[in-house]
Image (cartoon, rainbow, N blue to C red):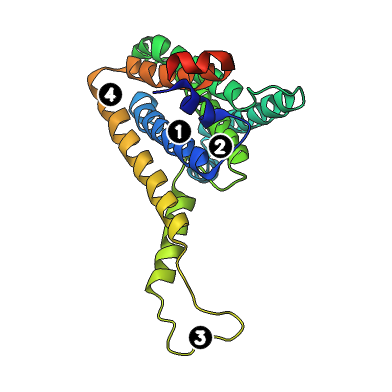
Amino acid sequence: MPIKYLQGLTAPERTQQSNLHLGVSLAFVAGAINAGGFLAVGQYTSHMTGMVSGMADHLALGKLDLVIAGLEALVAFLLGAATSAILINWARRRGGRSEYALPLMIEAGLLLVFGLMGERLSLSMTLEVSLTIALLCFVMGLQNAMVTKVSNAEIRTTHVTGLVTDIGIELGKLAYWNGSTPHPALGKVQVNARKLRILLALTGSFMVGSVVGALGFKHVGYVSTVPLALVLALLASVQFVPRQWHKLTE
């Protein structure tokens, strides 16, 4: 694949196509991490709605240790998102072209750590499990914030609740019968076909990534995240390739 295309995915200059291609790629990665991470530590790490609900349930049941564990995961996700924003704004104000590549590079590094240290979890040590959950939540927050800033909040990649909701809205528009005399002020109710295609692509990519991640962890184990880390590292690193080298790789 040409370096010029890969650079366009994380370039400061954004297009609808580059946003979609990057979003679909990262939705696949997020699905794989979420599903594989669940098999690894028994908990989804991108679902903050469920995390907060679980904390409330555990608090009501008096299970304070689980409340603290949930709070750690929530804070880790929050710190990941904050770190992404700091990196992007820092690079942007220095006129660099790596504002979106930096969060991806950190995500790649953390996933590599997860893949290489995961075997230690076979001892089922509580502290290690807690740290792993925090690491994966941090990664999800980092990625989601980066994609949010890239696409001006049009695309999300680490969860599908909003995506499915928006798909339902567009399908409702598609099924709506306008009648022969539309409202003179509001006009006809029409489906946003482009938006629907984007939503379906992101949801489908997340689903495929989840299947791949679950199968990878089932058959290979923690090391199955290493290819994901390498892909992210590739996406990030090409942004630092000098422009005069483009023609040599096209």
Q: Which amino acid does label 4 sit on?
A: Gly
Location of residue 143 with respect to 191 vertically, above or below: above
Task: Write down the quadrant of residue 78 in the picture.
Answer: top right
Q: Which of marks 2 and 4 is nearer the N terminus?
A: 2
Q: In the rendered view, tell whether residue 44 sits above or below residue 226.
A: below
- What's the CA distance linking mark 2 and mark 4? 25 Å
Could you say which is closer to the camera, residue 210 or residue 173?
173
Q: Where is residue 182 in the image (x, y as percent from the top left)?
A: 50, 85
Name the quarter where the N terminus is drawn. Answer: top left
**Which residue is denoted by mark 4 in the rendering?**
216
Amino acid under disc 1: Leu
Q: At label 3, which amino acid type do we have?
A: Pro
Q: Nearer the viewer, mark 4 or mark 1?
A: 1
Crowding around mark 1 (Cα neighbors within 10 Å: few <14, some 14 to 19, many 20+) is many
Horizontal side of residue 26 vs 59, given as left or right: left
Q: Are marks 4 and 3 in contact (CB under 8 Å)?
A: no
Answer with mark 1 or mark 3, whichever residue precedes in sequence. Answer: 1
Query: Which mark lies nearer to you, 4 or 3?
Result: 3
Cβ atoms at labels 4 and 1 below 8 Å apart: no
Amino acid at pointer 2 = Val
Q: Which circle, 3 or 2, is nearer the viewer?
A: 3
Identify the residue position indicated by label 2 in the image.
147
Is any atom of residue 113 visible in this view? yes
* Observer able to see residue 127: no
Q: Name the residue under label 3.
A: 182
Earlier in the chain: of badge 1 and badge 2, it is 1
- Are the residues tagged 2 and 4 within 8 Å (C-beta)? no
